[in-house]
Image (cartoon, rainbow, N blue to C red):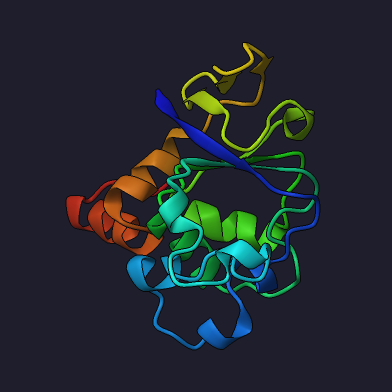
């Protein structure tokens, strides 16, 4: 069970705005990338640690979260470094959805969640059942349970580490 405060995004938050272009050339590092998360989304976040310092655990979004056609891994590393444990949206950009899996960050599809939450609401998420509860309002939202694989990848520190661990142990991957 994961509990924490949510930030509600608009529809079509682009990857280009989650991590603005001048930071794409930095090393992929959760701490470094987290400093500028959401800098291009809201003016109040366009300062070092502007988003991170708010203490959000979840992002709630509408359609096409993290779109933009560029598969920059800085976005996912930055979100995780900023303390985000899951992102709930009605839809995601496929490139960043795959990057999220590769890093072990749950990108969870849930219809109507974006209209059932307000920034600052306390949420509770059970990855094993997919249940999302807004503790502030009492509303409940359904999603599919997170694949155990996603938690295993996150625990291993990313897909490449996960594969290395499986190969070293002589286990099947998948």
Looking at the image, which residue sits at the far left?
169
Q: Is residue 108 above or below residue 95?
A: above
Q: Is residue 46 above or below residue 80?
A: below
Measuring from the top left, give residue 162's x and y in whole percent.
Answer: 32, 54
Asked which quadrant contains residue 67, the reply is bottom right
Q: Is residue 123 above or below residue 31?
A: above
* Left or right of residue 84: residue 89: right
Residues 168 and 55: in front is 55
Q: In the image, what residue occupies the spot 73% across and 57% down? A: 93
Measuring from the top left, give residue 163's x and y in whole percent.
Answer: 33, 58
Residues 124 and 97: in front is 124
Measuring from the top left, give residue 58's x and y in whole percent.
Answer: 53, 40
Q: In the image, what residue occupies the spot 68% across and 74% down? A: 16
* Left or right of residue 118: residue 80: left
* Left or right of residue 30: residue 12: right
Q: In the image, what residue occupies the spot 56% across and 37% down? A: 6
Measuring from the top left, give residue 80's x and y in whole percent.
Answer: 43, 55
Q: Is residue 10 above or below residue 32?
A: above
Q: Say which quadrant the C terminus sits in.
A: top left
Q: In the image, what residue occupies the spot 74% across and 25% down? A: 116
Q: Is residue 103 visible?
A: no
């Amino acid at each position: 069970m994961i509990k924490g405060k949510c930030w509600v995004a608009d529809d079509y938050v682009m990857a280009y705005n989650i991590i603005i272009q001048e930071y794409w050339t930095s090393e992929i590092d959760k701490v470094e990338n987290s400093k500028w998360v959401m800098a291009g989304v809201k003016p109040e976040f366009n300062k070092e640690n502007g988003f991170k310092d708010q203490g959000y655990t979840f992002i709630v979004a509408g359609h096409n979260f993290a779109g933009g056609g560029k598969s920059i891994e800085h976005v996912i590393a930055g979100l995780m470094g900023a303390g985000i444990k899951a992102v709930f949206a009605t839809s995601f950009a496929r490139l960043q959805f795959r990057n999220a899996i590769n890093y072990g960050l749950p990108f969870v599809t849930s219809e109507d969640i974006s209209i059932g939450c307000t920034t600052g609401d306390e949420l509770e998420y059970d990855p094993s059942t997919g249940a999302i509860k807004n503790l502030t309002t009492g509303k409940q939202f359904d999603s599919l349970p997170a694949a155990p694989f996603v938690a295993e990848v996150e625990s291993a520190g990313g897909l490449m580490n996960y594969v290395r661990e499986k190969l070293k142990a002589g286990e099947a991957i998948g």
